[in-house]
Image (tube, rainbow, N blue to C red):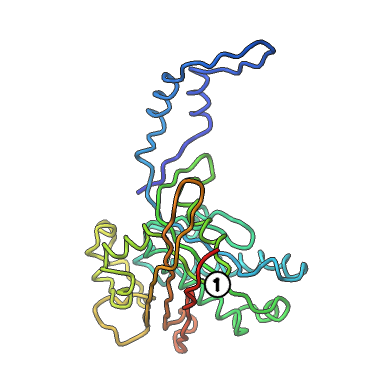
Amino acid sequence: MRVSKLKHKDLIDAVNRFDRTNINTSYATIPEENDLEDYLNEKVHPEGFSNKSILGIDIFQYSQYELSKQTLIPFLFKLIQDAVFANVVDSNKYLFQKSSILKLQKDFIQTGDGGFQILDTPLHAVSLAINYELFIRYYNSYHFYPKLRKLIGPISLRYSISTGSIFQYNDNFFGPGIINCARMLSKDDLNRCLMDQSTHDWFMHTMMGVENLQFVSIDDLATYPQFALYDRKLVSESEMIFPQEKDFAFQQIISADVQQIGEIKAKHSTLNIYNLHLQYLGSIREAKDKPIVITIGNLNLSGID
């Protein structure tokens, strides 16, 4: 589903049709706004906003690095991100067949030490997080820009996954899906992978729970409604993460555990938060002869602040 786009020119034309600035020193009357409200509802169609998944990422304890290292970390993150995008397009061809490197770049909200990636489903979010964690492991073990590794030191990422409505105004993304994702990241003091109730419900409805990720094949994905228009032929010879058929004797997700850990209360809404712990055995194409095990999140179930 495409993201609903709102253009500044369309909105300003709509507002100017029914409203005007009224800056003066006389007493201001409060007008009826029904005509403008009806017209904007017709233009905006909020009930038709896209439901997307958002993967939030940031460098754990970024502010505690020395200033010289803080200046290099956004550059390092961009290097890792470029490698991740190239890898998913090349080695996750089935799942990311509707994406390109350019589209992934355009659908990323930059925050400096991380950001928020707009994706079609929670499955895309988990898969992208696995790719990030692979390159973080290569970096930390001096296999990816080893001199930068020596200069900056080890880094770790924390993740959050939300699912909700978003819209695009000019070139920026907005909406509750992004707000909820940002809230989870900001409330977590550990390098975990958190997800909201909507994301948890998607996995429950689609595959009877996120724990079953380790038993999902591309044959299974092809039966899910969200992948009805995906081309089954677009499968890489070295397809990462999910096997083509139900053959689980090689590199794959080893385990996936999830537990509810608390609630986040913000303004008038409450978010139920779940902690995801996932292990994956695999590699990128250049290192396919030496698979490694990476872990996303951790098993610390202490509350969130």
Percent position of residue 183, x then y: 52, 56
Percent position of residue 157, x then y: 56, 71
What is the total number of numbered labels drawn onto the structure image?
1
Q: Which residue is mark 1?
A: 191
Give the quarter of the figure containing the C terminus: bottom right
Using residue 35 as the reference point, say whether residue 66 is left or right of it.
Answer: right
Furthest residue to the top?
Answer: 26
Q: Residue at x 47, y 72 (%)?
A: 131
Amino acid type shown at disc 1: Asn
Using residue 268 as the reference point, say whether residue 25 is left or right of it.
Answer: right
Percent position of residue 57, x then y: 54, 64
- State the SS at label 1: loop
Q: Residue at x 42, y 20 (%)?
A: 34
255 over 175 or under it: above or below: below
Percent position of residue 19, x then y: 52, 18
Q: Which one is nearer the viewer's eye here, 132 or 23?
A: 23
69 over 18 or under it: above or below: below
Badge 1: residue crowd in 10 Å (few <14, some 14–19, many ≥20): some
